[in-house]
Image: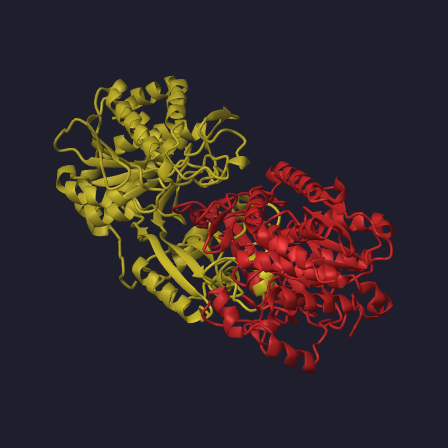
Chain colours: A red, B yellow
C-alpha cells in the first residue's frame, strides 16, 4: 500500500514541523558538560510529551546511570515486523561560541537551512522519523509496522552508557526485527547514501607530569624536561612521517577490503577533491596507498582532539608547567578491537616516554566498529525508500564516524542497524554554525514514511536476514 | 661612616614594614592581562605616595605607551655618586588560581614567609630599597649618595616597553653612576649571591593553521593533517633526542666560558642535586656536556610556556581543530642576539613545516643577555654590603633569568647593573604560592643600607669602572 496520504499530510505541515524542530534545538542538551544535566532532562520531557501528542504509547523517560532514555512504542499489532527507530537528543558542546554567527541554542532559519547545535546531529535527523510517524498515524490511521523508539541522551558523551543495559533488560519485550537510525551524512544534496559500515572510536586522555609545581623558565629552563615538550614528543611519535599510525601492531587486525569493494567505493563514494574542499584544506594527508575516502572509512585513524598545558592567557608567562595533557581518539575498523588498541597504545607510550617525566593514560570510552552485509533486506527496503523520498538511488556507503548504539544493538538485540543519513557533508557536525538543510528534513520525512511502508514485508525474510548479518568483532577476516 | 642609626631604625620598624609590604602586594598589578590596567595604575599611585611620604622628591607617575613608570629622586647633593635603584611593581599572572593555598592578592604571613603574587618578584625585593632609603633619611638625616628610583610596570609583560624611551630622554639629567636592582635569587638562606650575568629572552607565539573550520574527527580523521599534530611535530623538532636545541646555527654565537670560570661556578654555584630538588623532578635533562647549573646559566635554552588547541573542556569532543598554538621562550646568552634567533627559528620552522598546514610565528618580545666584569667596583661595594647585611660573603653568580632593564640601562645609560637578589630558590617565582622569606626582607633592607654607604666612594673609581664594563652584544668573544 502506498502511503500517499501520509506524504500529503507531511507536505502540508512543513512550517509547523520547522517550528517544532526549532523548539527541540533550543534545549542546550550538551551531554558531556555536567552543567547541562538539567537541560537534558528538560529536553527529554519535551520529546516524550511530543511523542505522546502524535499518538505513540508507553512513552517513558527511563533513568539510566547518566542522562535518561526516551522510550515509546506504537500500539502493538501482532504478526507485523517491529522496527526500532534510534536517535539521540543530546548534542556536542557548542564551544567555541565566538565562532558562531547565530546563537547555537537560538535556532535560526536562513537560506533554507536551520542553524543551531544539534540541528543536524541528531535532533533534525531524529525528528524526520517522529514526523513520519505522526504523518502516518494522522493520515493513514495506523502504522504498517510495530515501532519502538529509543532516543538516548548519552551519544555525544561517547558511550551510550545506559543504552546497553536497557537493551539487555528489554530484549525479549521489544522483539525488534531491525533498527533504523539517521545520524550520518549523504553524499551531497540529492545524493542519498546508505551506511553499511561504521568505524569504532576509542578515546583517551594522556597526561604528562613533570615538575611538582610550575617553574620559572629563566631559573630552570634548559635543565628540566618540559612536560609540554615531552607530550609533543610522545604525540609526534604516534605517526610516521608519511601519515601512518606508528603504533606497533596497530594495523595487524585491520580487515582488508576486497578489490571489488574498493572499486565500488571509488565509483560511488565521495571524491577526494570534494572531501578536501569540504574540509577546507589545501592538500591531502594520510596513510599512503589509500584515497582520502578510503582513509576515512576502511582505514583506522588516530586524531588529537585537544591539547593543553602551561599558560593559555593573553601575553606571556615564562613558566615551565608541571603538567600537559591531550585528548586522543582512535577511529578503528573491523576487526580492530578497543581493548586491544588500549593495550597497544599503552605499550607504545611506555616505550617512548622519557625517564624525565611520568605519564598517565586514561581510556575515556570505547565503541567498536560495525559492518552490515550490503544485501540485507532491511538495507534493500531503505534503498527503495530513498528512491521514493529523494528520487535518487542511494549509494552504499561506509562511514568514518562512530555510532556506539549500532554496535550495542548488534550485540544485545542481535539485529543490524540501517544507517539512513540525511545530513549533508557541509552541515558542520560538531563544529560552529552547524546546520540542517530543510529540503533534506522534508525529503527525510518522506523517506522515513516510505521505509515504514516497505518494512512491512521485512519479516518474510527474517531468517535470511539473520544469517547474512556480519558483525565479526575480534575475528580475523 | 657606618649607618648604624639607619640599621637600628630599620630593626625597630619591622612590623610596620611588613604591613606596608602587604598593602603593596594587595594590588593585582598583572601587567600582561589587560583587565588589570587600572590595578597597575592604582598600584603606581600607591607607590608614588609612599615614596613622597618617606621623603623622596620629584616623585612622578610617568605615562608610557603602556603601564606607567614611578620615578623619584632624592634631594640632589653635588659631587656625590648617583645610584639608580630599579625595580618593578607589576607581577606575573596568578593563574592557576586553584593551586594557591592563600589568596594570591590577599597576602598572608605564615612561618616567617609572606605569601602572595609578587611577594618576592618583585614587590618585596623592590621594597627593601624603599625601606633602606626611609631608614637612612629618618635616622641619619640625609643620604650618602644621590638616589634615583625607577619602578616600572612592564617588566613581566616582557619588554620594559616604556623604560628604554624614558632612559634615552633623561640620560643626561639623571647622571647615573651605576644601577642596583634586586630581582633575583640568592643561593639559599644565608647564602647571598651577586649576579654578574643574565640570560636574554626572546618570546614567540607559534600558530598552526589547518582546516578553515573545526571538523568532525569521524568524517575527516585520517585524511586531514591535524593542526595539533603538526604543531607537536614542529615543536618536537626543536630539540634533538639528547636535549640539545636542534635549530641549525643556534649555538654558533654562544660565548664559551673559560675553564677557570666553569671551575669557579662549580665551586660556588648551585649544586645540580639542589636544582633538581627545587624543581621537584626526579631526573636531569638537558644539553649534554654541561651541569644543570651550567645549562641554566651559561647555555641557552628553549622552553615551551604554553600550548593549546582543540577542545579543552571536560569530557570529549571528537573534533579536528582548525588551529593550535604554542608559546615559546628562548633564553639566550652572550653573544646570541634576539633578532638573529628570530631569523634562525623562522628558517627552521619553514624547513620542517609540512605542506599540509600553514604557520604563523609572531615574536612577542626580545631582551638581550647582559654580563658585567666581576671586578667592577660597584659589584665590590655590593659584596661588602652583603657581608654586612647577611654576615656571609656572597658568591658571584650567573643567573638564568632575564631582566630586560639591565640591558636597557647598559645600552641607554652606559652603566652596569648590580644584581643584588634577596629571593630564595624555593620562593616559587611565577608559580602558585609565591612567597618572600621575611628574614631576607629584613636583611635585604640592611644590605641596601650598607650598599648606599659603600657606594658613596663609587665615583672615585668611575673611569676604571667604565673601562671594565663588559657588554659585548653581537660581538664574537
Q: Is residue B173 left or right of residue B209?
A: left
**Residue A451: % across, % down:** 71, 61
Q: Nearer the viewer, residue A194 or A339?
A: A194
Q: Is residue A48 left or right of residue B255?
A: right
Q: Which quarter of the image is occupied by the C terminus of chain B?
A: bottom left
Q: Which residue sits at x=71%, y=76%?
A: A256
**Residue A384: % across, % down:** 69, 68
**Residue B159: % across, % down:** 31, 47
Q: Which residue sits at x=51%, y=46%?
A: A107
Q: Nearer the viewer, residue A102 or A378?
A: A378
Residue B300 shows in the view: no
Q: Give the mark count.
A: 0
**Residue A378: % across, % down:** 76, 65
Q: Which residue sits at x=70%, y=65%?
A: A382
Residue A70 shows in the view: yes
* Location of residue A93 with respect to A415 vertically, above or below: above
Q: Which residue sits at x=60%, y=69%?
A: A391
Determine which quarter of the picture holds residue A243: bottom right
Q: Nearer the viewer, residue A170 or A295?
A: A170
Q: Nearer the viewer, residue A295 or B125?
A: A295
Q: Which quarter of the image is occupied by the N terminus of chain B?
A: top left
Q: Is residue A475 left or right of residue A133?
A: right
Amino acid at each position: 500500500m502506498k502511503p500517499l496520504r501520509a506524504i500529503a499530510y507531511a507536505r502540508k505541515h512543513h512550517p509547523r514541523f520547522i517550528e517544532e524542530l526549532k523548539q527541540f534545538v533550543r534545549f542546550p542538551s550538551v551531554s558531556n558538560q555536567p552543567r547541562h544535566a538539567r537541560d537534558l532532562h528538560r529536553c527529554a520531557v519535551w520529546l516524550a510529551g511530543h511523542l505522546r501528542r502524535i499518538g505513540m504509547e508507553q512513552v517513558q523517560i527511563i533513568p539510566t546511570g547518566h542522562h535518561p532514555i526516551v522510550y515509546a512504542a506504537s500500539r502493538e499489532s501482532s504478526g507485523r515486523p517491529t522496527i526500532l527507530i534510534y536517535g539521540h537528543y543530546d548534542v556536542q558542546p557548542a564551544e567555541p561560541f565566538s565562532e558562531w554567527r547565530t546563537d547555537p541554542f537560538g535556532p535560526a532559519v536562513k537560506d533554507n537551512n536551520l542553524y543551531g547545535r544539534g540541528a543536524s546531529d541528531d535532533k533534525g535527523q531524529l525528528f524526520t522519523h517522529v514526523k513520519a510517524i505522526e504523518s502516518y498515524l494522522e493520515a493513514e490511521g495506523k502504522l504498517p509496522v510495530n515501532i519502538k523508539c529509543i532516543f538516548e541522551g548519552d551519544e555525544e558523551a561517547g558511550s551510550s552508557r545506559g543504552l546497553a543495559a536497557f537493551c539487555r533488560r528489554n530484549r525479549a519485550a521489544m522483539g525488534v526485527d531491525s533498527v533504523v537510525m539517521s545520524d550520518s551524512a549523504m553524499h551531497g544534496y540529492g545524493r542519498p547514501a546508505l551506511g553499511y559500515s561504521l568505524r569504532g572510536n576509542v578515546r583517551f586522555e594522556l597526561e604528562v607530569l613533570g615538575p611538582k609545581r610550575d617553574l620559572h623558565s629563566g631559573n630552570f629552563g634548559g635543565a628540566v624536561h618540559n612536560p609540554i615538550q615531552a607530550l609533543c614528543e610522545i604525540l609526534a611519535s604516534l605517526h610516521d612521517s608519511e601519515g601512518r599510525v606508528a603504533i606497533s601492531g596497530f594495523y595487524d587486525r585491520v580487515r582488508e577490503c576486497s578489490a571489488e569493494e574498493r572499486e565500488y567505493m571509488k565509483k560511488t563514494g565521495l571524491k577526494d577533491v570534494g572531501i578536501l574542499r569540504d574540509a577546507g584544506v589545501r592538500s591531502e594527508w594520510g596513510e599512503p596507498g589509500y584515497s582520502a575516502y578510503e582513509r576515512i572509512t576502511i582505514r583506522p585513524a588516530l586524531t588529537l582532539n585537544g591539547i593543553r598545558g602551561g599558560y593559555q592567557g593573553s601575553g606571556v608567562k615564562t613558566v615551565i608547567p608541571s603538567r600537559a595533557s591531550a585528548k586522543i581518539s582512535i577511529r578503528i575498523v573491523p576487526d580492530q578491537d578497543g581493548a586491544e588498541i588500549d593495550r597497544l597504545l599503552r605499550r607504545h607510550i611506555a616505550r617512548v616516554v622519557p625517564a624525565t617525566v611520568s605519564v598517565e593514560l586514561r581510556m575515556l570510552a570505547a565503541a567498536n566498529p560495525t559492518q552490515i552485509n550490503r544485501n540485507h533486506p532491511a538495507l534493500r527496503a531503505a534503498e527503495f525508500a530513498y528512491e521514493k523520498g529523494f528520487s535518487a538511488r542511494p549509494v552504499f556507503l561506509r562511514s568514518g564516524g562512530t555510532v556506539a548504539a549500532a554496535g550495542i544493538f548488534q550485540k544485545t538485540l542481535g539485529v543490524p542497524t540501517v544507517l539512513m543519513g540525511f545530513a549533508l557533508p557541509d552541515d558542520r557536525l560538531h563544529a560552529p554554525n552547524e546546520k540542517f538543510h530543510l529540503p533534506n528534513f522534508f525529503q527525510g520525512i518522506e523517506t522515513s514514511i516510505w521505509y515504514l511502508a516497505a518494512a512491512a514485508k521485512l519479516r518474510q525474510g527474517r531468517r535470511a536476514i539473520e544469517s547474512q548479518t556480519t558483525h565479526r568483532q575480534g575475528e580475523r577476516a
